[in-house]
Image (tube, rainbow, N blue to C red):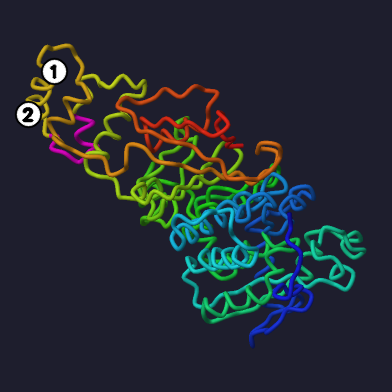
Amino acid sequence: MLNGPNENETSSSSVSSEPRDTMSAGTATLERELSRTRRLLWGEHVKEDVFRRWAQGFAFSADEPSALIQQEGGPCAAIAPVQGFLLKILLSETPGHSLRDLTSEKCNSLLVRAVCTILSQCLASKYNVAVYRKNDSEADTSSGLNVSAEEQSCDAIDHFHRRMEVHSFQTLSEVEAFYTRNIRILKDKYGVLLLLYSVILSKGVGTVEAELSELSDPLIHSTYGYGSQGLINLMLTGRAVAHVWDHDQVVGGLRLRGIERQNDIGFLTIMEHMQYCTVGSFYKNPKHPVWVLASETHLTVLFSSERRLAAPETAGESAERIFRSFDPEGNNFIPSAALQDVLCAADLVSEPEYVELMRRKLDSESLGIILLSAFMDEFFPGSERGAPDTFTLHHYNGLPRSNPSGHVIYRTGRAALLECPMHAASTDPMLTCLQTKWPSIDVVWDEGQSPSLN
């Protein structure tokens, strides 16, 4: 439910406390930047249905005060990262606090701070905040869901760009104060899109284009309306790179950019289980126990108050993960012929003479296999997990239709890391996705059913 305006929620038709540097649509500089941003986001042609699905504000659930609602498919590439950073702030500052006791003022503050966190990652010399100027008929409605006569008479995206202006700020504290005074900018219709434009205009269109140089497709799919991996990475890390592995990799002579450092919040995807990509340690082991989860078509958020889940991966955990990657069927052993590849991937001694010595020791009965337990005892004796054996997880999905009874609420699960990896059934995408980080995890969710990733 979109919260109604109060004394702190100024309509975006009369933006308060304007900064000195403001560009309105029609000026040559803004028109040029908006044209490049439009092409970067949408490509040459925008389907009316796709634009309409992205034309929503940030609205909180009536059933979960800090959970954002996604009205239709598409804008999860912006909404899920904002939700992730909002939860990161909330869990960091109020550990153990009931998520149901938050006031609307507190949630608005969390929204503003989450947005400012995303903007801060752009490392901008100044922050360019996009604002939609309502006409008189639009200003009469707080939700902006009604279509004005002007909007009906022209292409919706052209109307949107004609009514846009950009406010420039030198510091993030000025941005936070501006959004706090004018919270309706974020919460009215177009709030989600205005954040995307603000991120790109702050970072610099040319810089984003350079980071996306490997790709020719727009950031928003022109047919289906979902956000690209480049857009997701831009919102999560401040860099619009196309891949989710650690650092850059050279493939076929091309340098392909990945994630360059440990991030505040993480990212996991079921596409890794399908072997379409490899998510690096920077995304799997973020600074805070919050992860954006990706299915084939949608983004949701997983989070926990258990801080130990955000601990860096230990050497033993890294080696066990690498060993299991050579054991896709979860048998807890690998062919002895694969030992050299495992040692090399784990950055252990992999000289042929040493490998042969270890192979004879670990496969003393010449069965042609090496057990995980024998491997760990040899190379990482007494290795302990950084994560606890049991912990509580919470899951957020912003689409009402994907929640029980259509109410957007956080789901809760009790997780356990077992001795042997679980084999997730194909009917449980949630467990399959989580096992890309925790191969031996099992989760019992409230109501006896796993939350939907879609």
Q: Residue at x 31, y 43 (%)?
A: 387
Q: Residue at x 85, y 72 (%)?
A: 135
Range shown magenta: 340-350
Q: Front-most of 442 and 262?
A: 442
Question: Could you tell me if residue 145 is visible in this image?
Answer: yes
Q: Quadrant of the N terminus?
A: bottom right
Question: Could you tell me if residue 36 is visible in this image?
Answer: no
Q: Does residue 432 lie above or below 20 as drawn?
A: above
Q: Residues within 10 Å of mark 2 (few under 14, many from 20)?
A: few
Q: Residue at x 71, y 40 (%)?
A: 406
Q: Which mark is residue 333?
A: none
Task: Of the two numbered discs 1 and 2 on the same chain, state the one appearing first in sequence.
Answer: 2
Place of residue 150 in the rendered image (x, y in percent of width and height, measured from the top left): 90, 65
Q: Amino acid at mark 1?
A: Asp
Left or right of residue 316: residue 203: right
Marks 1 and 2, how far apart at CA:
15 Å
Q: Which mark is residue 353?
A: 2
Viewer-side label of 1, 2:
1
According to the image, label 1 marks what residue?
363
Q: Front-most of 308 and 414?
A: 414
Q: Residues within 10 Å of mark 1 (few under 14, many from 20)?
A: some
Place of residue 96 in the rendered image (x, y in percent of width and height, measured from the top left): 45, 54
Q: Residue at x 59, y 35 (%)?
A: 452
Left or right of residue 398: residue 338: left
Q: Mark 1 falls on what kind of element?
A: loop
Place of residue 391 in the rendered image (x, y in percent of width and height, measured from the top left): 39, 40
Give yes or no for residue 186 being in the magenta stretch: no
